[in-house]
């Protein structure tokens, strides 16, 4: 579909969603980014990319995308929720990393989450 209609945003959503589902997050991000390039004010593309960043534990990038969603569509409730989750997880990781420095937690335990 993408070869025959390279500006068909839904095709990038679909393929990005499939990549995300099998853990190929970088490829999913590429497709969502392409959808954003085609339709820069598409809140859904930013939301999907934000979800993928969150799964990669790239909290700052997820927060930026969720904030963009909220800017485009202030009624997108799930974007507020996910942005809150991103801030929470970012804070938890920061605390876990401090515990490792204080030798109160093992690094291999933190790597699972951050």
Image (tube, helix red, strand yellow):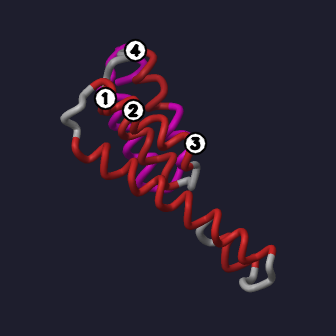
Residue contact at pointers 4 and 1, CB within 8 angstroms = no
The Cα–Cα distance between marks 4 and 1, rounded to whole angstroms, is 12 Å
| Residue drawn at the location 72% of the way across and 70% of the way down | 98
Q: Nearer the viewer, mark 3 or mark 2?
A: 2
Q: Is residue 7 left or right of residue 26?
A: left
Above or below, comparing residue 41 to residue 100 in the picture = above
Above or below, comparing residue 83 to residue 103 in the picture = above
Magenta-colored span: 1-30
Q: Which mark is residue 38?
A: 4
Quadrant that contains the N terminus:
top left
**Which residue, given by chain and number where applicable, does mark 1 sit on?**
43
Q: Earlier in the sequence, mark 3 or mark 4?
A: 3
Residue contact at pointers 3 and 4, CB within 8 angstroms = no
Residue contact at pointers 2 and 1, CB within 8 angstroms = yes
Q: Earlier in the sequence, mark 4 or mark 2?
A: 4
Q: Nearer the viewer, mark 4 or mark 2?
A: 2
Considering every residue shown, the one lying at the far left of the view is 75
Above or below, comparing residue 103 to residue 78 in the picture = below
Report helix, strand or loop for mark 4.
helix
| Residue drawn at the location 39% of the way across and 16% of the way down | 40
| Residue drawn at the location 33% of the way across and 22% of the way down | 9
| Label 1 CA crowd tier, 10 Å (few <14, some 14–19, many 20+) | many
Would residue 9 be counted in the magenta stretch?
Answer: yes
Instruction: Look at the magenta stretch and give its main secondary structure.
Output: helix
**Which residue, given by chain and number where applicable, does mark 3 sit on?**
26
């Amino acid at each position: 579909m993408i070869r025959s209609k390279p500006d068909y945003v839904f095709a990038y959503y679909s393929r990005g969603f499939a990549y995300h589902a099998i853990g190929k997050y970088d490829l999913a991000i590429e497709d969502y980014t392409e959808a954003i390039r085609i339709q820069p004010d598409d809140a859904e593309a930013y939301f999907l990319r934000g979800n993928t960043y969150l799964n990669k534990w790239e909290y700052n990038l997820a927060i930026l995308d969720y904030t963009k969603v909220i800017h485009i569509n202030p009624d997108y409730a799930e974007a507020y929720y996910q942005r809150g989750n991103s801030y929470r997880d970012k804070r938890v990781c920061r605390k876990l990393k401090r515990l490792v420095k204080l030798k109160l937690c093992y690094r291999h335990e933190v790597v699972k989450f951050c």
